[in-house]
Each structure stands twice: as C-alpha cells, then as structure tokens.
Image (cartoon, helix red, strand yellow):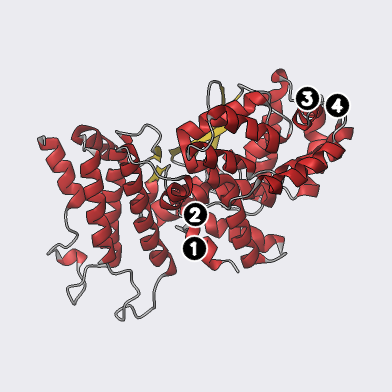
Amino acid sequence: MTQHQRLFLALATATIMTASLAVHGSQGQTRPDTAMNDLAERYVKLVLAMGQHDADYVDAYYGPDEWSTEAERAGLSLVEIGAAAEVLITELDQTDDGSGPDNRDGPDDMVQLRRKYLGRQLQALQTRVRILGGRTLAFDDESRALYDAVAPSHPEAYFQETVATLETRLPGQGSVVDRYGAFRRAFIVPADRLDQVFDAAIAECRRRTLDHVDLPAGENFTVEYVTDKSWSGYNWYQGNYRSLIQVNTDLPIYIDRAIDLACHEGYPGHHVYNVLLEQHLVRNRGWPEFSVYALFSPQSLIAEGTANYGIDVAFPREERVVFERDVLFPMAGLDPSGAVEYYELQALVGQLDYAGNEAARRYLNGEINRAAAAEWMSRYAMMAPERADQRTRFFDQYRSYVINYNLGKDLVAAYIDMQSGEDSSKRWDAFVALLASPQLPSGLRDSSP
C-alpha cells in the first residue's frame, strides 16, 4: 500500500471518538451532529473512491475539491473500500441519533432519518463493491440490495389484456406495435422546432413549480442535445444550484416527451430535488453526505420516483392536455385536434409500464437473450424495434436501475396520497417535504397503508 493509500484509508476508517472538549458534551458523550458529520465525510470519500472503479457511480459531487484529489491519489482497491464501509456501518450503529434520554427536546425525526439513510447507502455501496468484484446477483436481489426495493413481477397475461384493448383502438392493419408506431408518427416534433418546444415546456414547468416551491436565487440549468446514449435524458447536477440537462436525439422525440423531460429532469424533478438537498441539507444543516450522489443506491429510487411523480403533480392530466393542445402542438406544427385521442392512447400504453421491468428481469437473470428482451418490449411495451434495442443497452449499463422509474413513482404516489389526500396544495407541500428529506424507499413503503 502506498503512502497516499494509507493516509486516505486512515481518514476513511478512523474512529469517531476524540478527546477535544469542542466535540463532547458535559458527560463526555460525542455530540450526534459532530459524530455523524465525521462519518458522513468518510462516506463521501468512499463514494469518490468508488468512482475511480466505476465511471457511472458518482452521479454528482460538489463538495471540497481536495476530497476528490485525495480519492484519486489514494487509489483504494475495492477490497479496501468494502472494508472501510464495514467499519463505517459498525460505527454508525454505535452513534447517538439524538433520541436518547439526554435529549430533552425529544428526537429530531430528520436526524433519525439521516442515520437510517446513511446506513442504507453504505450497505448499497458494499453491494456495488461486490458486483464490481465479480459477484452476480439475481435481478430482485440486486434491486433490493442497491435500491431498497423490489418491483412486482407480472405474467404475460397481465399485459395481454391491455394489448388487446389497444388492438381494438388503433387504426390500420398489421401488428399492434406497428399500428401504434404509425399512429404516433403524426406526433413527432420536427428537429427544427425541438428547441422552441422544449423551451416552452420548461418555462411552463418552472412557472407551475415556483407557484408552490421556494427556490434559491440563481438556480438554473442549461440544455444540450446529444446522441449515442442509452438514455433519453439526463440531469448532471453541478452544485451551486445549477444543472446541465442533456436530451438524446438519437430517436424521434414525440410531443409528450417535452413535458415529460422538462418536468422529470428539471421542474419539479431532478433539478429541484438536487437544489433543495443542497439548500436544506448541505448548506443549512451542514450534512456533507448530500454533496455526493451515488447512482447505484436507494437515493436513486427517491430521485427517479419523485421526478416521474412530479410530472403529474405539476400537470394534472386534464391541464396537461389543454396546455399541450393549445400551446405545444401548434408550436411543433402538429394538428391539435388529435391531442385528446393521443393522450387517451398514451394512458393505455402507460398500463404496460412494468413490461420493461419484466424484460430486464428475464434478460439479466439469463432467462432470455438480448433479441428476446427487445422482442418482449416491442410486444408488451409498445416499443419500436430501435427503441427496444436502445433499452437493452440501458439494461447492460444500469441493470436493475430500471425499477426506480415506475416502482419509484408508485411508491412516491402512495406516500404523497397518504400525506395529502385529494388536496392539491397539500400534495405540493408533501412532495416538497419529501424532496428535501433523507427519506428511504423502505420508509415510503412502511408509511403507506
């Protein structure tokens, strides 16, 4: 082991107790915030160390530059990272969370959530270490270990009923996926109007979000159009309340994707989520663990679930159809008279959302090959062959991550509905509170009826 490695590992695994009076109470007990911040800093450094082995692992980081430099110079092995994570988990279990008898004001719910969050994130890091080390997990075991959740499994019959309904609704001849593709071609946004349409969608998503969410001054993002990606859109959070949003133009972009991407990647989705975490948890509370985003972790289910659910929060269906029909359709040069029928069919296709999970589960478990996975998604998820092929590339790169979109949305929806009922203003309040909290997927599930 080199000197840099020894120094970095010492920082990552050093015990949290210290003799300094500045960090102890009158009874000699380490203050919870100080102890947790020490553990959190070491967690951040381990996530950065993982980034040296896994290019996708660190999705965002805006903490001290020297921590990144330390991680790069130390070059910890996967074995060393796993061992350091184990030490952190042990110490975390021994750390006061503020719920003891000495806390006269009672426990801070956010502090207790924080402790659970950090422990579960560390367990997911350990799992990712094992996967990179060559261990293969079954799809459901992997999603449980990484994302704190398991998606439901559905047989073919579950999807066949919806496909049969689509067959009666879609005009023309040929297979149902071909007829669906032919129907949708009338709703492709021309390339020369794409930027204008996205700008209008973003502006409306932002306006609706700001009616309910207090965002810090200067928050903003830029949009880039890219190609040759396995995803359709991506938010790269930069810190300082700024994001870079990339939109993949490899395949045709349909009119509904403007609002979907503007909400999911921007307002009130990923951009707002990261801004609120930085504002409330990193800056206001001084919790360093939220200055880094480990992609293969429970945080991703919260991030993707809130981003997808946020579309419905910002745009209840009737309002969305009216806005797109009256604003985006004409802007894209599309016939607005088809808007209502288009969204009725999109709602039907949405009932097939879990078909992609089934394809991923079977493919990654070795039950079917890539071609069969793509064919399944064409048959039961209404994906054109080229889009289904792109999705299998996503499976290869991100594996069980796919559950975070649909299962994440469902868990978030159930949680928010329980908090707010039918009151739309309460729905926004509960949604924003979730965005700015260290909640775990299992916490959403345990809080639901």
Q: Residue at x 82, y 43 (%)?
A: 165
Q: In which quadrant will I find the N terminus?
A: top left
Looking at the image, is mark 2 or mark 4 earlier in the sequence? 2
- Outermost residue, right side: 337
Spatial separation of the CA atoms under disc 3 and disc 2: 36 Å
Q: Which residue is under mark 1?
A: 443
Q: How far across and down, in percent of the image, does residue 107 sit?
A: 39, 74
Dot 2, crowdedness within 10 Å: few (<14), some or many (≥20)?
Answer: many
Viewport quadrant of the C terminus = bottom right
Q: Which residue is at a point 12% across and 64% down the rendered structure image?
A: 19
How far apart, in angstroms, are the residues tagged by discs 4 and 1?
A: 48 Å
Task: Give amino acid for label 4.
Answer: Gln
**Sequence-wise, which precedes: disc 3 or disc 4?**
4
Q: CA distance from mark 2 to mark 1?
A: 10 Å
Q: Is residue 10 left or right of residue 217?
A: left
First in sequence, mark 4 or 1: give its number.
4
Q: Which residue was labeled with disc 3?
A: 185
Residue 434 is left or right of residue 8, and the answer is right
Choose the circle earlier in sequence order: 2 or 1: 2
Name the element at disc 1: helix
Mark 2 to mark 4: distance in Å?
41 Å
Q: Position of residue 423 (x, y in %)?
A: 71, 64
Q: Is residue 212 above or below residue 259?
A: below
- Label 1 neighbourhood size at 10 Å, few (<14), some (14-19), many (20+)? some
Residue located beneath label 2 in the image: 149
In this rendered view, identify the residue nearer to me: 118 or 331: 118
- Residue 296: percent from left, percent from top: 42, 43
Mark linked to residue 173: 4
